[in-house]
Image (cartoon, rainbow, N blue to C red):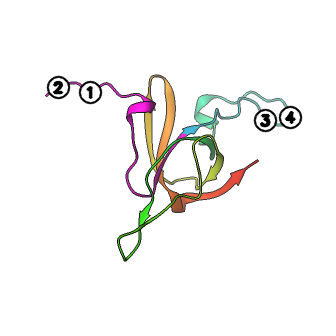
Amino acid sequence: MAAVSLSVSTVQPLGDRVFVKVSESEEKTAGGILLPDTAKEKPQVGEVAQVGPGKRNDDGSRQSPEVGVGDKVLYSKYAGTDIKIGGDEYVLLSEKDILAVVN
């Protein structure tokens, strides 16, 4: 089996899938208490790194995605597949799992 070298630029999501770079989780609480790794929650905010061509409609045409590369998005807590590339964490999820675009 040949080894495959992955990078963000070589990953192209299919259909209505979106590749999101996960934002860093909070190190401290609002009161200043440091959190250990086991107590940190999975972040739900990230930046879109790659976008698929869009969902296919019943007539075969494609519906273009509502988000684009560089958008900051809020997504469902347990959605998608976690992927680690070069020390950075990403999540590959369906466009329907994106809840909002964050300004």
Which residue is at the far left?
1
Magenta stretch, main secondary structure class? loop
- Would residue 98 appear left or right of 62 to someone viewing this image? right
Q: Which x, y percent locates residue 77? A: 58, 53
Specify the amino acid type for callout 1. Val
Specify the amino acid type for callout 2. Ala
Q: Nearer the viewer, mark 2 or mark 3?
A: 2
Label ID, residue 4: 1
Specify the amino acid type for callout 4. Gly
Q: Give the mark nearest the N terminus, 3 or 1.
A: 1
Q: Give the mark nearest the N terminus, 4 or 1.
A: 1
Label ID, residue 2: 2
Q: Could you say which quadrant of the image residue 6 lies in? A: top left
Label ID, residue 31: 4
Front in this rendered view, residue 100 or 35: 100
- How far apart in space, not on screen, are marks 1 and 2 (Cα)? 6 Å
